[in-house]
């Protein structure tokens, strides 16, 4: 079992829809969780960090954390073609390493 | 504030050679981490340095090494290059150990 798992996609949504990206992790002692966005040929860019159970909103983005279910998600409201990218879930495990999922490719169709 | 910078941006080497990559963190950041990204394996953690000490290490062979200087700048070295070392090498900095990390543009290494 991989430490951090994401559906590879591609996930295709129409412009203006809500995109839902999911991530599960195996280390129950993990405390910090991050979502990064990576455009093709570019480096990862931080979107959100979340540390406590519940929702955290920043503009069109909402991160959700459920430590009991070991589950993190990212919702993108009013998706735009410019949101088309690979979204990486990252988890800081008990050993202090930041472990990344394989990423979910999102395509927003105009 | 200037972001993380990495040099060189592109590099072509041949098998058996060695390579040194450089990373300058965001001003004030004391922790630097290195990652290897390949299409097959994704983003994999190499090591993290804080206050000139390696605090964490990933599952890579000893050919991969690094160091951090007193000004927080970091270098990583790969000796005896193999074809499989072709990858994007990313450096990320954070203000303190195990805080949110911000990535540089990466160094794309091609081993022929």
Image: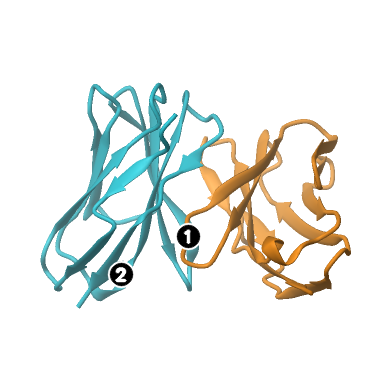
Chain colours: A orange, B cyan
Residue B5, by quadrant, is top left
Who's the residue at 81% across and 61% down the image? A79
Question: Which residue reaches farthest bottom?
Answer: B112
Residue B102, above or below B36: above
Q: Which residue is under mark 1?
A: A42
Is A103 left or right of A70, judged from the image as shown?
left
Is residue B51 visible to us here? yes
Which quadrant of the figure contains the C terminus of chain A?
bottom right
Q: Which residue is under mark 2?
A: B86
Please report, as a chain letter, where disc 1 is located. Answer: A
Is residue A62 visible to us here? no
Who's the residue at 53% across and 43% down the image? A98
Mark 1, secondary structure of its residue? loop
Please report, as a chain letter, where disc 2 is located. Answer: B
Which quadrant of the figure contains the N terminus of chain A?
bottom right
Q: Nearer the viewer, mark 1 or mark 2?
A: 1
Q: Position of residue A33 (x, y in %)?
A: 67, 40
């Amino acid at each position: 079992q991989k430490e951090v798992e994401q559906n590879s996609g591609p996930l295709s949504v129409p412009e203006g829809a809500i995109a839902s990206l999911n991530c599960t992790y195996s280390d129950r002692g993990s405390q910090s969780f991050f979502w990064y966005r990576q455009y093709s040929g570019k480096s990862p860019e931080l979107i959100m960090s979340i540390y406590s159970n519940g929702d955290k909103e920043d503009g069109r983005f909402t991160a959700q954390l459920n430590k009991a279910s070991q589950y993190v998600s990212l919702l993108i409201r009013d998706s735009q073609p410019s949101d088309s990218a690979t979204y990486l879930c990252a988890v800081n495990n008990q050993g202090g390493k930041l472990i990344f999922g394989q990423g979910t490719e999102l395509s927003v169709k105009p | 504030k200037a972001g993380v910078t990495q040099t060189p941006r592109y590099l072509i080497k041949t098998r058996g050679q060695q390579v040194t990559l450089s990373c300058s963190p965001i001003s004030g950041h004391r922790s630097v981490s290195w990652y290897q990204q390949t299409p097959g394996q994704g983003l994999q953690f190499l090591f993290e340095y804080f206050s000139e000490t390696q605090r964490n290490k990933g599952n890579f062979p000893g050919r991969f090494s690094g160091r951090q200087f007193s000004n927080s700048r970091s270098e990583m070295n790969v000796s005896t290059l193999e074809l499989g070392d072709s990858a994007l090498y990313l450096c990320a900095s954070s203000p303190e150990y195990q805080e949110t990390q911000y990535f540089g543009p990466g160094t794309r290494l091609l081993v022929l």
